[in-house]
Amino acid sequence: MATSGFRLGIYVFKDVEIVDFAAPHGVFSVARRFDPELEAFLVADALRPVQAQAGFTVLPNYSFADRPAMDAFLIPGGFGTRQEIRNGRLHEFVRSQPAETLLSSVCTGSWVYAKMGLLDGIPATSRKEPDRVEANPPGKVPIDRLADLAPECRISRARVVDAGRIVTAGGITAGMDLGFHLLRRAGYGDDLIGEVARVMEYQDAYKLYRDDVEIVS
C-alpha cells in the first residue's frame, strides 16, 4: 500500500552534480501525474541560490533551519561532496531525521554517510566509472574511495543498494533508478512505476535496470 503524501527531500549544495538531483526529482514530478500527493523538493544549508556544476543555479525550497518533514532524504554526488563530507551542519541535519526517514544517495553522495559512520556493516555503492582526473594518479575511482572512507562497509557494484533505512545508487543516471526504487519503497506497484517510466520514455532502460538492485532484508 502506498504511503499517502510521500515526501522526498533532495539536498543541493555548491558543485552538486546536476543529473544526480534532477533525475530523481524528475521521476517524482512525472509520478505526480498519477498521484498528486507525491512531492519532491530541494533542501539546502540556507535559503539562497545554490550553484550546481557547470554554473547551473537552483533555488532551494527549504533550509536546514526549516526542518521540513520528509519520508526520504537524498544526498546527490558531484565535485562538491569533497567538501560536504566535512560539513558538520549537514551531518547534524542527517542525524536529526526521525528513524523512519529513509536516507538515500546518488553517486558520491554516499561518501557523506560513509564519513558519518552510517555505512559500517551494511552494503552500499557509488559511481563506478571514473572521469579523466579520477582515472589517473593521484585520482581514485569513486567507489574505491567509498571503500577508503568506510572500511567496514561491504562495497556493492549493484546499480541500487537497499540496506533498509539507507539506500544508495551508483552514478550519474542511476538517480533515475533510485527515484523508481523510492516509489517502490513508498508502496507503489510495478504497474504505476512502469507507466511513469513509459511516460518518461525510459521503459527499456527501466526494464534493463530494475533488477540491478541489491536488497538486504
Image (cartoon, rainbow, N blue to C red):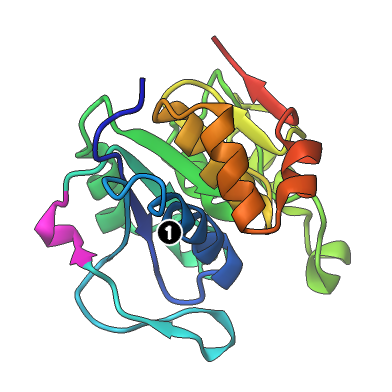
Residue at image position (51%, 46%) is 105
Does the magenta segment cover residue 66? yes
Q: Position of residue 197 (x, y in %)?
A: 63, 48
Q: Position of residue 122 (x, y in %)?
A: 56, 21
Asked whether residue 205 appears in the rendered view, the answer is yes
List the single residue furthest toward the top. 217
Compared across the picture, whether 199 is left or right of 104 comes to right
Image: 178 above or below 41: above
Which quadrant is home to the C terminus? top right
Residue at image position (68%, 28%) is 213
Secondary structure at numbered mark 1: helix
Three-letter code, disc 1: Ser
Q: Position of residue 26 (x, y in %)?
A: 50, 61
What is the magenta range? 62-68
Does the magenta segment cover residue 23? no
List the single residue furthest toward the left. 66
Name the residue carrying label 1: 29
How many residues crowd around disc 1 within 10 Å: few (fewer than 14), some, or many (20 or more)?
some
Viewer-closest of 28 and 147: 28
Viewer-closest of 172 and 86: 172
Residue at image position (81%, 39%) is 208
Which quadrant is home to the N terminus? top left
Image: 152 above or below 82: above
Residue at image position (60%, 56%) is 199
Q: Position of residue 89 (x, y in %)?
A: 25, 57
Image: 37 above or below 80: above
Compared across the picture, whether 121 is left or right of 137 comes to left
